[in-house]
Amino acid sequence: MGPALLPSAERPRLAPLTAAEIFLMALGLVGLYAGGILWLAVYYLSATA
């Protein structure tokens, strides 16, 4: 029996995300995105130099 078959009172409740957690996750995603762009830029410049 999976968790979906349990009554809602017995199902483990996920804590709502706090603003800090949302901010940190967004910051991490932006950091990964910017890091990827930066890596590609450095790779492109070093390859064309």
Image (cartoon, helix red, strand yellow):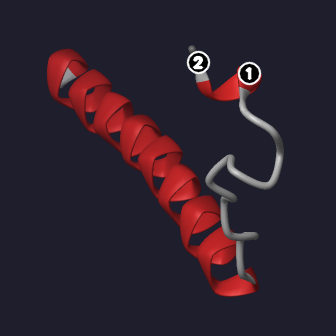
Residue that badge 1 annotates: 5
Q: Is residue 28 above or below residue 46?
A: below
Residue that badge 2 annotates: 2
Q: Is residue 47 above or below residue 22?
A: above
The reply, left or right, for residue 1 in relation to residue 17 is left
Q: Quadrant of residue 39?
A: top left
Say which amino acid is labelled 2. Answer: Gly
The reply, left or right, for residue 5 in relation to residue 1 is right
Residue 43 image position (x, y, % from top left): 23, 27
Q: Quadrant of residue 17?
A: bottom right
Residue 34 image position (x, y, % from top left): 49, 49
At numbered mark 2, what does the secondary structure look like: helix, strand or loop?
Answer: loop
Q: Is residue 16 above or below residue 1?
A: below
Residue 29 image position (x, y, % from top left): 55, 51
Residue 35 image position (x, y, % from top left): 38, 48
Identify the residue at image location x=64%, y=61%: 26
Quadrant where the image shows the C terminus: top left
Identify the residue at image location x=35%, y=28%: 40
Q: Mark 2 to mark 1: distance in Å?
A: 6 Å
Say which amino acid is labelled 1. Answer: Leu
The reply, left or right, for residue 18 in relation to residue 7 is left
Q: Nearer the viewer, residue 17 or 48?
A: 17
At numbered mark 1, what does the secondary structure look like: helix, strand or loop?
Answer: helix
Q: Nearer the viewer, residue 43 or 30?
A: 30
Q: Nearer the viewer, residue 3 or 31?
A: 3
Q: Nearer the viewer, residue 1 or 41?
A: 1
- Say if mark 2 contacts mark 1, CB within 8 Å: yes
